[in-house]
Amino acid sequence: MQRSASVGTSCQRASRDIRLPDRRSFNGAISSKQGRLFLNRCFAAASFKLLSPVIGQRSAADVAVQKYKGDRSGRPSASGARRVAVVWFRNDLRVHDNEALATANRESTSLLPVYCFDPREFGTTVNGISSTGPYRAQFVLDAVDDLRESLRAAGSDLIVRIGKPEEVLVDLAKKVGAIKVYCHSEVTYEEELTEKQVAAALKTEDIQLKACWGSTLYSPDELPFETDKVPPTHGEFRTAVASLPIRQPEKAPTQLKGKPLGGGSIPSGDIPTLDQLGVKPLSYIPGAPRCKGGETEGLAQLDRLLSSSALGSSVSSAFCASFSQQVSPWLAMGCLSPRRMYAEVQARASSTSKALMAMAHGELLWRDFFRFTAKKYSAGSIKKNSARQGSSVTASASPVLAMACS
C-alpha cells in the first residue's frame, strides 16, 4: 500500500511538471494503444520517480517520448551514448578541409559516409540536352572512387548508391539509427532545392540535416554582409573582403570513426559505369583530353602547377591566365579546397613572389564572388516559388529538373 501511494505521488508530481507543449508532443508522438500502455508504464514505474522532471533542458516527458520512439525505430534510447551520423558527400569529394566530415567525426561515435548518383543529374532536360556530359561524368566517377580509397585508408568506407538523395539518405539513416546527416550546402537552384527536399524527408523521421560550408575561400559568416546582400559587382565585393583574414584549411583526418552497428551488413555498392548512369561512353567522342578526377590527382596537379612556376619574383601574364583553369575541374567538384590551394601557394611562395600570392588570391576572389552571387539569386528563386506553390517545393518547380530519370 505504501509503495502504491509512493508511485501515485511520483506520477502526480511528474504530470504536474509536464509543460503544455510536452502534453501535445505526447498526443502527437504516442497515439497507438501500445504507445499509451508504454506511457502508463513509464509514469507508473517506481524507477521513473528517480528521474528529475527536467533533465538538462529536456523534461521527463521528452525523455519518455524519445525512449518510446527509439524502441520503435531501432535507435538507441535517450540514455544511450551511441551517436550515429551519416555524411552526405556532394560537390566536396575530398577528405582534407572538409568541414562536414570533420564535424561529423568530432560529434559522433560512428559514421556512415554516402554518395548518391542522382538520376536527375545524369538524365536529359526537356530540351533534349544531356544534364551531364561524358567527360564530366567520368571525372565524377574517378573522384568518387578516389574518395572511397581515402576514406578506407582512414578506417571508414563510402556507401555508393544510384538514386534520389531524399530517398536513399532516409533509408540508410533509418537502417543505422542515425540522428543527424551532415553535408555541405551548395549554391545553385537545383542543388539548394535537393537539399531542402532531403531536409524535409529526414524531418519526417526526426533526423536532422546539418549543413556546413566549404566551397569558397571565405565562409558566409566571415563576410561583412549577408548573402542576400552580396554586392552586384566584383569590384565592390573585392573591396569589402580583400583584407579579411583567411582561415587555415583543416587537415585530412588520419583516423575516422568506424561504421555504426548494423552498418557492416549494408553493402558498399559498386562505382557505376557511364552506361549505368545513362551517359554516352567516352569512346563515342574522339579526340578529347583525359582529365582524371579525384583529390589525389587534384593535389598532384596543384603541385605540378606550382613547381612549374619557379615561384620567382615575377609571374608571367600567360601563367596568370592559365593558373585557375588548370585546377578549376578539381575546385568545381570539391576535390581541392580553395583554402588548401591558397595555403599551398602561401607556403611555397618566397618573400619575393608577392605577384604569385596576389594572383592566386585574386583568382579565388573571383570564384567566391560568382558562387555567393549564385547563392543570392538561387535562394531568392526558391523563396518566390515557395510563396507561389505553398510550403512544399517539388522538383517540378524548376524546368531544369524535369528530366528523364533513366
Image (tube, helix red, strand yellow):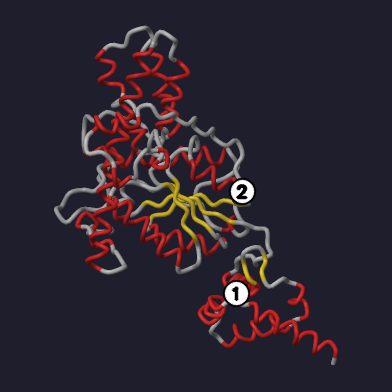
Decide which of 80, 235 is in the foreground and name it: 235
Quarter location, residue 283:
top left
Decide which of 23, 199 is in the foreground and name it: 23
Apparent side of residue 46 relative to residue 175 in the rendered image (left or right) = right
Apparent side of residue 2 relative to residue 382 in the rendered image (left or right) = right
For the N terminus, the quadrant is bottom right
Determine whether 143 is above or below 164 in the image.
above
| Dot 2: element | loop
Label 2, label 1: how many angstroms apart (C-alpha)? Answer: 29 Å
Lower position in the chain sequence, tag 2 or tag 1: 1
- Across and down, in percent, residue 211 comes to 44, 51
Residue to which mark 1 is pinned = 65
Mark 1: few/some/many CA within 10 Å (<14, 14-19, 20+):
many
Disc number at residue 259?
Answer: none
- Across and down, in percent, residue 388 comes to 22, 66
Determine whether 335 is above or below 308 in the image.
below
Q: Which residue is at the far left?
A: 127
Q: Amino acid at mark 2?
A: Gly
Residue to which mark 2 is pinned = 258
Quarter location, residue 80:
bottom right
| Dot 1: element | helix
Q: Which residue is at the far right?
A: 2
For the C terminus, the quadrant is bottom left
